[in-house]
Amino acid sequence: MTSKIWRWINERIPLKIMLQVGLDEKIPGGASFFYTLGSATLFVFALQVVTGIWQLFYYVPTVDHAYNSLNYLRIFVPYGWLIHGLHYWGANAMVVLVALHMIRVFVWGAYKKPREITWLIGVFLLFLVIGMSFTGAALPWDERGYWAAEVGTSIAGTIPLIGSFLESLLRSGNFMGQLTLSRFFILHTAIIPGIAMIIIAAHLTAFRNFGSVGPWSNEKRKTSGAVLSGQTKLP
Amino acid sequence: MAEIDTENVSKKELSRRKFFILISGTLSSFIAFILGIPLIASILGTVSKVKNKKLSKLTRVSTIPILKPVNLNFATTKTDAFIKSVEPQDAWVIKRSNSDITVFSPICPHLGCRYAWNSNQKLFICPCHNSVFDINGKVISGPAPRGLDTLPKKIQQGELFVLWERFKVGIPQKIEVGD
């Protein structure tokens, strides 16, 4: 019965091939925990999307209710503390994972030809992650978030020539206020994640084109193994 | 690590591989199920609401005329999720003596309209469907299934306080409707 359904599905959408690509891909030198950092980052991003959307059931981006609505979520909504906490710590974890991922790629030399554009797209994703961190921190409109946004936009204001313009663009005026919160909110929940999803797709496409680099030792690269090889091979 | 060639692996190895795929799939589904609980519970779960059980001040008892229903306004504080607001309400007050006071909810128990005291006929009449009540709130005529609803009240140091409550309309029983 299951195989019948499985066949019916695969005649219409190549799920089996997708699974094979994911699980049976041959990686030069075999699988390694060092290669999991990109996937881990992608997983945390997915977690941020889900917990972020869920918080929108309760959060309102207005200066008089933002903090109260978040407190309501954290205190009165069942598991609200968990959903908010996952989003908060997920954001921290994402910055750490992105840093580790970049260090890994740099040390292994995985940015070299023909993967330069993959690396550059990745650097652009780093800026998007920083952007989401910055705009997200302001949303509770508590002391920490408010002053982080005040300081951050002031730093933008010190840039020669375009500083003042950039500062008032971010703040929607000369001073922090409701429109600042609205801007940070829409940047955090729609614009930056939207761009990030497209860029992630480009990053993955570019990565898929050449696959993993594998270890730097030429000797080790001669062998290869699947992602799940270690677990599925008999000793 | 040796290369995996799916065409040349032994049957035994393949079943072991299938076993691991099944195990990791089951574990993943279990983890997904556990992770799904908070997401669903946060939407479906009973969201505890702060119930407003605060008395509102109506007026000084001595200013209420005897056996002449008066409509008095007062303010209630309402908590809707995280938004606290003050809402104006009103009630009909009948004083028989300084210690015998009745406070009626201004909402008709028939279908929720606002009735009024007709001082010529000395009756409460609802304009929507002609439910008529006497000064004690008893149904005289019309479709109302029960008499006027009284509100809990308290007299403290010559001041009249009332607790704002809503009741289900259209049924013979007086059942409070929570927030």
Image (cartoon, rainbow, N blue to C red):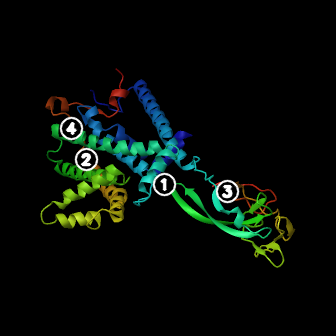
C-alpha separation, residue under disc 1 versus residue under disc 2: 35 Å
Amino acid found under the numbered disc labelled 4: Arg
Residue at the spot x=51%, y=48% of the render? A8
* Mark closer to the observer (3, 1): 3
Tell me the residue that label 2 is attached to. Answer: A207
**As drawn, which residue projects farthest toward the top?**
A235
- The quadrant of the rendering that contains the C terminus of chain B is bottom right
Q: Nearer the viewer, residue A5 or B28?
A: B28
What SS does tag 3 mark?
Answer: loop
* Mark closer to the observer (1, 2): 1
Tell me the number on the disc at residue A104. Answer: 4
Sequence-wise, which precedes: disc 4 or disc 2? 4
* Mark closer to the observer (4, 3): 3
* Mark closer to the observer (4, 2): 4
Q: For this view, does B9 lie left or right of residue B176?
A: left
Tell me the residue that label 1 is attached to. Answer: A57
Q: Chain of mark 1?
A: A
Q: Nearer the viewer, residue A120 or A14?
A: A120
C-alpha separation, residue under disc 3 versus residue under disc 1: 32 Å
Q: For this view, does A43 lie left or right of residue B34?
A: left
Residue at the spot x=70%, y=54% of the render? B154
